[in-house]
Amino acid sequence: MSASITPSSRPAVTEREARAVAEAAREQHWRKPSFAKELFLGRFRLDLIHPHPVPEEEAAQRGEQFLAKLRDFVETKVDGALIEREARIPDEVIDGLKELGAFGMKIGTKYGGLGLGQVYYNKALALAGSASPAIGVLLSAHQSIGVPQPLKLFGTEEQRERFLPRCARTDISAFLLTEPDVGSDPARLATTAIPEGDDYVLDGVKLWTTNGVVADLLVVMARVPRSEGHRGGITAFVVETNSPGVTVENRNAFMGLRGIENGVTRFHQVRVPAANRVGEEGQGLKIALTTLNTGRLSLPASCVAAGKWCLKIAREWSAAREQWGKPVAHHEAVGSKISFIAATTFALEAVTDLASQMADEDRNDIRIEGALAKLYASEMAWTMADELVQIRGGRGFETADSLRARGERGVPAEQLLRDLRINRIFEGSTEIMHLLIAREAVDAHLSVAGDLIDPEKSLGDKARAGANAGAFYAKWLPKLVAGPGQLPTSYAGFKHGVDLSGHLRYVERTSRKLARSTFYAMSRWQGRMESKQGFLGRIVDIGAELFAMSAACVRAEHLRARGENGREAYQLADVFCRQARIRIEELFTRLWTNTDDLDRKVVKGVLSGTYAWLEQGIVDPSTDGPWIADATPGPSQRENVHRPIR
């Protein structure tokens, strides 16, 4: 029995309904331990990350062999400046990557892929992305969130056998969730999939389809209406891009990442076999979120590569450029920036490698660690690139082509700044990541006390919740008073020349302080806690710094134990931790001393036009047009710019 709805009717969703959709999609249970979850609860579980996990020898050998081939390819076949100028990756480069197996890095050997783990996949993305960020995005969008990962996690064996060999060698895939009027609020998803016989009929428009312009296969999220025999809900489908009714209407252009193939895709009466549905009806959002748990780790990999390049250029330039009789690196104002870049790059690599190896081992639940890695790396990499531009001065603002044209080294510092900017938005903006991580961080509290602050719960429910909360907090709160962080001998194994044990004691003490602050805020604001986004963001940022400190110390000890630059690693970890502690103390101060309430008043005034006089005296260069493009389903009126690469 088929169902019918009006395709043009966008779901009317209340705030509570939107939250309910997001809550239903998240993983409800913690079946495995989580270092970051424990950290937010005031429990510093160093045993979960130390000794540092390592890849198996055979996996490492395969990974290193592929990295050697990939390095040779990007050094000899990739012209990053050409890709930037022409805003397109040459077809022969994409064909070469296919032949190399780069599109099948994360696909198992059973299906024709290379079967690399997350650690070496990330190293490969960092290497390829350093040659051209557009190539890093092409490979990542294909494998981190495109067809391979959802099928690996939720697909049937028949689906894997049909699609994964194609993805490993010949086909490019893309992931389609966002719509012109739907970003991080999927409850309002308007693209529909109407059951009709053995098919579903898709109608709708998708925006910012990375790889969508050149993709052969798409993972599409669409809403199935509830009807007899159909539970309905947001559902995932694998769609062939050459299906009748699929039109790529536009190739979008951006501030950075000029070579990416990102577009607008319209579906009009596109028939998709039920066999192409991934998972069950209504599982689409869960599939998307689960895929992103590890998929987000590709962004930190690109940020690590950016930090390494920033450090290299800062070192070479600051030694060559003299000011007032000595190299600029020897001036404290510049030297402090170089120290920040070096220490932060070390920490970002520590965070990324640790989270990636934890993903490969699958002993821990890394949903928070992956999200923290994405959040922290995207913010810190942007800051490092900005500092590099500042160190370079006017040359940092000048394009590489212009520098080269007048006889100097073509250093694309300004391009890096533009390319990195999107990472603070891609796959969950910083603001959304704050809310997502905060929700997971307070999960234990909501599990025992959530009904207390739910206005729709009965008095009986609240009474039971009160009893459960009382029992939980009676055991939990006393443990936040004292711990190993107050013992001078704790973590003595991290003292080798440079003493890192004090930083780990600080992490332990501060994790308890963070948990106490969260508890106090929940007691103070109760049901209004979810609206305190400024507070929640700072709580998450403190947790991110503590996670990075922990990873940096563990990595330093890991390198020392292996005889790999241990002394220098300890120095970098020490400097990073000292810098992080300053940031943490500032964040704690801002938990309670801030302008959040005043900001809300100003925002109301801005929106009501109270301050419109402040906007006078300018000319707005924007063109006319709606703020959000019309996405009414129907046949396309535009040329199909789909450009498959064969």
Image: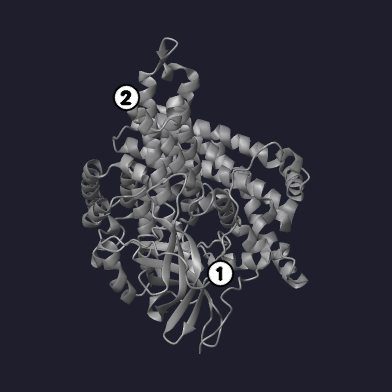
Identify residue for label 2.
407
Q: Secondary structure at mark 1?
A: loop
Q: Is residue 188 visible?
A: yes
Specify the amino acid type for callout 2: Gly
Looking at the picture, does residue 327 appear above or below residue 63? above
- The amino acid sitting under disc 1 is Thr
Against 607, is 275 above or below? below
Residue nearer the viewer, 180 or 297: 180
Image: 182 above or below 577 = below
Q: Is residue 593 left or right of residue 440?
A: right
Q: Residues within 10 Å of mark 1 (few under 14, many from 20)?
A: some
Compared with 315, 465 (above or below) is below
Q: Residue 48 in the image: x percent, y percent?
A: 44, 50
Instruction: Work out which residue is located at the far bottom of the displayed protein and give it.
Output: 1
Q: Residue at x 47, y 44 (%)?
A: 255
Whichever of labels 1 and 2 marks the residue nearer the N terminus, that label is: 2
User: What residue is drawn where x is 32% and y is 37%?
Assistant: 561
Q: Quick one: SS at disc 2?
A: loop
Residue at the spot 33% in from the left edge and 29% down from the top edge: 404
Q: Quadrant of the C terminus?
A: bottom left
Answer whether labels 1 and 2 touch (C-beta < 8 Å). Answer: no
Residue 437: percent from left, percent from top: 56, 53
- Residue 540 location in percent, x, y? 58, 47
**Residue 50 seen by the camera:** no
Nearer the observer, 466 or 110? 110
Residue identifier under label 1: 632
